[in-house]
Image (cartoon, helix red, strand yellow):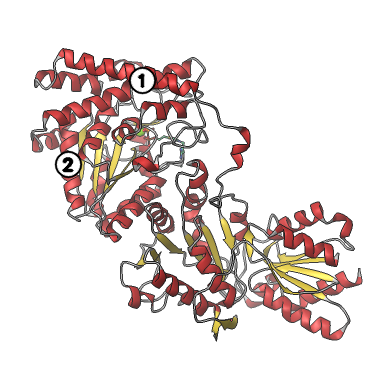
Amino acid sequence: MSDTKTEAHRKGVQGTVAPEVLRQIYVTAVRSRVLDERIWVLNRQGRAPFWISGMGHEVFQSAVGAAVDPSRDWVVPYYRDLAMTLAFGMSPKDHFLSALAKADDPNSGGRQMPAHFGSHAHNIVSTGSPVATQMLHATGVALAMKLRHTDALSVTSLGEGSTSGGDFHEALNFAATHKLPVLFLVENNGYAISVPLDKQMPTSHVSDRALAYGIPGVSVDGGDAVACYEAARTAVERARKGEGPTLIEGMVARLTSHSSDDDERRYRPADEIETVHQSDCLVRLERYLLLQGVLTEDDLKSIRDAAVKEIDVDMEAAEQAPLPEPETALRYVYAEEA
Amino acid sequence: MAVKTLVEAIREGMRQEMENDDRVFILGEDVGAKGGVFGATEGLHAQFGDDRVMDSPLAESCIVGVCIGAALYGLRPIAEIQFQDFILPAVDQIISEAAKMRYRSNNDWGVPLVIRAPFGGGVHGALYHSQSFEAMFCSVPGLKVVVPSNPYDAKGMLISALRDPDPVLFFEHKKGYRSLKGDVPDESYTVPISTANVVQEGRDLTIFTYGIMVSQCQEVAAAVQQERSVSIEIVDLRSLRPLDRDTIVASARKTGKVLIVQEANLAVSISSEVSAIISESCFEYLDAPVKRLGGPEIPAMPFSPPLEHFYLVTPEKIRTAIEELVAY
Ligand SMILES: Cc1ncc(C[n+]2csc(CCOP(=O)(O)OP(=O)(O)O)c2C)c(N)n1
Ligand SMILES: [Mg+2]
């Protein structure tokens, strides 16, 4: 995942990140991983019909999540942003309710497929399935933030394949023209379902396109929590000062098939499937934290144990929760009279 | 109270609601200093400034998508699409996003957004400045679609739309902008955006129509009624989604003969839906088959005057249809 561009960026941002921030990033990433793995199990057991995973993207999302302020900032995520939603305060229970299509699923009341996130209470805008539409929503949110004279910002994300469509361009163009406080995140895992990067675009970095909008564009190694966090912090400062949006591309790895309905062995080279796990962002973060003395082996274990325990409890609660009543399908097409 | 044109009434509705509610702002192409290509926003930029009357980049998905985001944050955007013909790049944002936001979030989010767009032909606008796309949006639950037929309704329905918690498509017939005139109160008021309006009562025949066709039908009906003893009811549908089913059914049952008039081509259109409602609910009351008038099944309105005229529903066609129905 490292190449000259990310290396160059890496050298420029060798700042220090406070240990408690690194810990927070790690905790979010671990909770996301354990939760993600558990929903896969539910899927393979036939209890959750569909799942689309964020595995391999967690460190990037958790680092950006740690650099923003979920109490005032908003996020318009995409389907791989499980860790980001946890950073914004959603719980594993919320996601189990969604995976099991329960009535109390806060994302959609069991109406949408899982991983279509949204929770007003957590400043997470509801998202649908068409890719890249959310770029414009985050831009509009940021416009409103600016018109209302807040110092809040919006964050939005998408995969590299989704940057080929028009809404990506239209959003960057508008946000840059009006210097809106937006963080545009590209989670570049090299594939759009089966289509590899070199069939998607002529360059290897989406961040190069920032030049055309007159905004900063950086590519960071998505397994390097410090680089991810520093890039996000720089972008946050710029946004809060009213200087406009930043394009941050996290070079990440998709550790699973595209979704539970996909089998990547049909198109992904076997050796790549083998080796991609060797650069697992979570393993790399653990190694870094140990090396820097931020956390001990015991700390790592207790964080993971706590995540497993939380997820056991939350899954149990979600399993007990009721399914929606069939006729409720008719509700909320429009606002209902109070 | 003063006589105003359709476009003046629309502008006044926007101005008064912008004065009344500082969350309302306009985003669209050329809406700023120029005041829009039809003048709908004339003077508003001077009054409200850059932040509330914003010239957008030339990108329709951007206009609607950004307005959706702003609405989610609590503002009350007006998206102006310069011509309805160019709304197509924004259809994904309208149908996949705005229309589904409340439903897909189980009422956690809503999109209070008004999308205004001029539509319709008869102005030498040819294929891409004459179309009537309303039916496409009327099959989408989650959207409201309205077409005012006169200045009074236009102002009142626009203010209602701006206070509505859900997305409203507000389609304005461009030929009516200056040709439709009528009394409009100076103060702010609302007209509901979910009801039809019986513009004239009658006993023998009902014409269901909307937009600029309402006044045209009124003129023809008046002439026919002068010549012969026939009593024609005219219902201005004005809210195309939701359709006012009760008013449609009551009128069709009362007169027993139905003519539906629209400018758009007939296939899978408003007239299709109105006649389906009537066949479901008025079968035993009908004295004649439902008759429909609309554009031909060609891709759009051609430019050359004879070709354009051929497309349009003219007073002569309306008169012939009425006479055939009366004679049935
Ligand atoms: C407009 C649209 N076209 C097609 C799809 C089907 N689809 C869902 S995800 C996806 C691939 C997206 O790839 P990428 O943007 O790289 O994100 P990743 O899944 O790799 O994170 C496709 C084609 C869709 N959801 N929306
Ligand atoms: Mg991808």
Q: Residue furthest front?
A: A338
- Can residue B291 be seen here? The reply is no
The residue carrying mark 2 is: A233
**Cα separation between marks 2 and 1:** 30 Å
Q: Earlier in the sequence, mark 2 or mark 1?
A: 2
Residue found 86% across the figure and 61% down from its top = B289
Q: Who is closer to the viewer here, A204 or B10?
A: B10
- Residue A311: mark in rendering: 1
Q: How many numbered marks have been drawn onto this rendered protein structure?
A: 2
Q: Which circle, 2 or 1, is nearer the viewer?
A: 1
Which amino acid type corresponds to the residue marked 1 in the rendered image? Ile
Above-or-below relation of B152 to A179: below
Percent from the top left, x then y, of residue B245?
71, 58
Which amino acid type corresponds to the residue marked 2 in the rendered image? Arg
Above-or-below relation of A124 to A21: below
Mark 2, other Cα within 10 Å: few <14 / some 14–19 / many ≥20: some
Q: Chain of mark 2?
A: A
